[in-house]
Image (cartoon, rainbow, N blue to C red):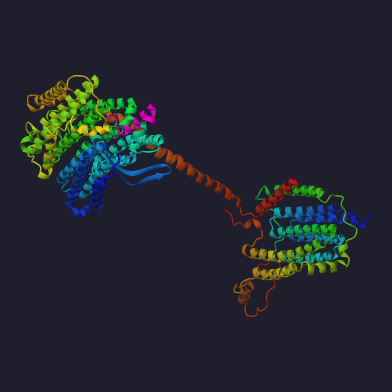
Amino acid sequence: MRTPVAYYLMLSGILFMLGTVGVLTRKNALLIFMSVELQLNAVNLALVAFSRLHDDLTGQVLAFFSMVVAAAEVVVGLAIIVAIYRRRRSVDVDDVRELRW
Amino acid sequence: MPLDNVVFWVFAPISVASAIGMLLVRNAVHAALFLIVNFFCLAVFFLLLDAPFLFAVQIVVYAGAIMVLFLFVIMLLGVDSDVPVRERLVVQRPLAFILGAAFVVELFLAIRAGVGFSTKAPDVFTANEAGNTQAVAKVLFTQYFFPFEVTSVLLLVAAVAAMVLAHRKASTVTQAEIDAAAAGSDADELPVYGAGATP
Amino acid sequence: MVSQPDGALWLIPALPLATAVVNLFWGRRLGRWAGWLASASVALSFVVSLALVSQLVAKPADDRLFLQHLFDWISVGRFVVGMDLRLDSVSATMILVITGIGALIHVYAIGYMAGDPRYGRFFSYMNLFVFFMLMLVLGANYLVLYLGWEGVGLCSYLLIGFWSDVPANAEAAKKAFITTRIGDTLMLVGLALIVFRFGTLDFEAVFGTAGSVLTKDAATAIALLLFAGAIGKSAQVPLHVWLPDAMAGPTPVSALIHAATMVTAGVYLVVRSHVLFELSGLALTVVLVVGVVTAVFAATCAVAQQDIKRVLAYSTISQLGFMFMAAGMRAYGVAMFFLVAHAFYKALLFLGAGSVIHGMHDEQDLRQMGGLRRLMPITFATFLIGALAQAGIPPLVGFFAKDAVLEVAQHTGREVTYVLGSIAAFLSAFYLGRMLFLTFFGEGRSDRARQAHESPPVLWVPLAILAFGVATAGWLNLTPEGRVTGFLEQVTGAAPVGNGLEAAALAATATVISIVALALTWWIYGSGRVDWIGFRERLEPLPRAALNGWYVDRAYDIAVIQPAKTGAWITAYVIDDRIIDGAVNAVGGGLKLLAEGGRRVQTGFVRSYALAVFLGAVAILVYVGVRS
């Protein structure tokens, strides 16, 4: 391996940052969800990078589990979005604000 | 020039660019496609990092299943465009960028102080002795067996949850049934729902 | 020096206490019997007192002391106070007066208060008063004395305001209680000083070691503080203002409490504590000055009063001044004799006034009376005896008492005291004569006066008994030089003797002064030759000022009461309502504002929540980074 591990980590950080900005900035619930997936992937990258550094498969296994859970989460999240859409005809998160003062 | 270096420096910009692209486009389908590109790049990185099993799983699960699911829902709901209404929360965008930048800076400092920018991974990945998949399987079914079972239950629960959440009450009269009833007795074929048609 | 009686000492206060309780709870059911029960109990107490006192007298002169320890009242560390009773010559004198005259007044009250709806309650309070007064004089330490002191104050309040449906009565009761409270509080400080210095309140211990324990200043402080209590309770200047208003109570109350017994508690206190007073010469001088000033001041007020009971009230104040005069000149035996004599004739005068009021159908104004001597002969006769006694006409007992005081003054070189005392005596005879002639002589000046009738026997028999006592005391040689003071000398010490005019000359002078005063009043009020209404009007504004007690009440009102009321109003409505409640409400209001501002965090926008989470995450990272 010629590339220093730190480069992978920085890349992972940048991707995570982009995902976060996407979560905070977008209004469409589906796009927000996709940004969350981006965040999760960035973390997976960091996990695998560390696993390679420390010569331990734990990081890879953890990334694997993360993918599984992300899949389950996407399923449930999309079901919720569909349910909300059915009620309100909109997936704009700014419209869902009853729980306020 | 070592091969992994070249590959890294080719695919890293691509992944960042596709992520930025995903952020900027209006159309949800385009954004999903950009994300798929990003996932492919990440799969390549996994390969570079001596994790071929994850490379395959990433493509199959993420790009193949999850993103397809996304696209299904986008098409189903017909919410293609993210209409740029004026931002209600004024501080949101600037503050998000500032915090993001701060986060990256922090991370840079943390990495520099921790791992260090010159540390390279050891040349040989000894954990992969017997092949990556076998090694992963071995660890997965012995050391991490309990989380493995739990996640399988989780998947089951997620599937049930999705069915429950998305379920429509049986008594609700659908538009199709109303049309069929109005049209007469020969309307015994279900009409096709296209994108944008509301039930 | 201590002997145990056959345990009967406690019976003396216990009997009235028991009947007080009985009348309190079952008074209504007893009906008329409540009064007889109460009187019987006090009379029985008198009999027991007589028995014990005769036992006491039978002992040799230097062994006349009975002590009885009932139980340990307070026992804290080394400070022990017992419920102890003490019978020596001074307290013996007092209990005989209290129970004897008290019994007569109770019998009188049976008739006077007949028909009152709270008849039983009245006698309960009267008995309770007798109980507390007996505890006051029988106490063997200052705390039992104080118990009685406070108790009689309470009963005085209850009895003055007995007819509580009239607001003025309640006001008078309050005034009495609060005014004496000032004295009581100072007295309590005095008691605290005694505990501080002596570690005990027991009379034997305190008086035995006072000479070695106390400095002159400490003795002065304690004595003056105790005397402050006496000033309040005995209505001396400047705390005398409650007694004239206390006449709002029923006449038996005025007779018992405000003439014969409670107001004399102050004199008793001074006589009992004379050891402390003598250690400080200043205290005795203060007592003397207060006594003289009060005697003259009150006498001037009495001259102008129009209400028959108020004349007697101011008269009481003045006569108490005489007693303190005697005490201030170290003539404690004389003071005690004066106390006993005064109890007799003042009670007689008050009960007589009550009889007059009863016969006049509750009219108390002197201007409405007149010519009653033909319509109420027995009342007139007894009242005449009482008035002449106080005026100092020999051989009635009052003559001996007053003459003794003036004699001591003259013999010990206190010329000013002698002159002022004589002036007070002159005024005393004057107002008595005025009262006598306006009430009983001339023609009736109102319908009530013309239709007055004599009182029933239950009212005039006590009058007769008292009159008999007043008349015969001197004849029985119960004079200051005689048995009484000799009896008391063991406790009080001998009266000071000195050189001066001969006793006979002094006696003659005093008698002449009294006769001149009486003659003057006969000429003005009795003979019908002087228009006394016009006479009074020509002297204005002096009579009006005297009638209002030389405006002392108004001065107190302006200087003390209004500021106190304003202070109370400020405390209640400004400090409590606005500041304290305001602070509390402000805290509440502030919290409310805080909450109202705070709840705006819940905007409902998911994205701002996410932003907040991310902000927190970044902050934590910074903190961790900086730390390491």
- Quarter holding the N terminus of chain B is bottom right
C4 vs B55, left or right, is left
Q: Give the residue at x 33% y 25%.
A: C282
Q: Quadrant of the C terminus of chain B?
A: bottom right
Which of the 4 quarters of the picture holds residue C475? top left
Furthest toward the left, the residue is: C374
Q: Pick out the residue farthest to the front.
A: C60
At horizontal 22% and vertical 24% (from top left) the residue drawn is C408
* Closest to the observer, B48 or C30: C30
Residue C292 horizontal/vertical position (percent): 25, 25
- Please give the range of residues in magenta: C211-238
In the visual, does C242 lie left or right of C610? left
* Quadrant housing residue B136: bottom right
Q: Can residue C455 be seen in this snapshot?
A: yes
Residue C489, percent from left and from top? 24, 32
Tell me if I can see residue C253 in this picture: no
Q: Is C165 or C82 nearer to us in this picture?
A: C82
Point out residue C91 in the picture as x, y percentages from the top left corner.
25, 38
Residue C241 is inside the magenta segment: no
Q: Quadrant of residue C310?
A: top left
In the picture shown, does residue C347 fall above or below B77? above
Most common SS among magenta residues: helix
**In the drawing, does residue C513 fall left or right of residue B157?**
left
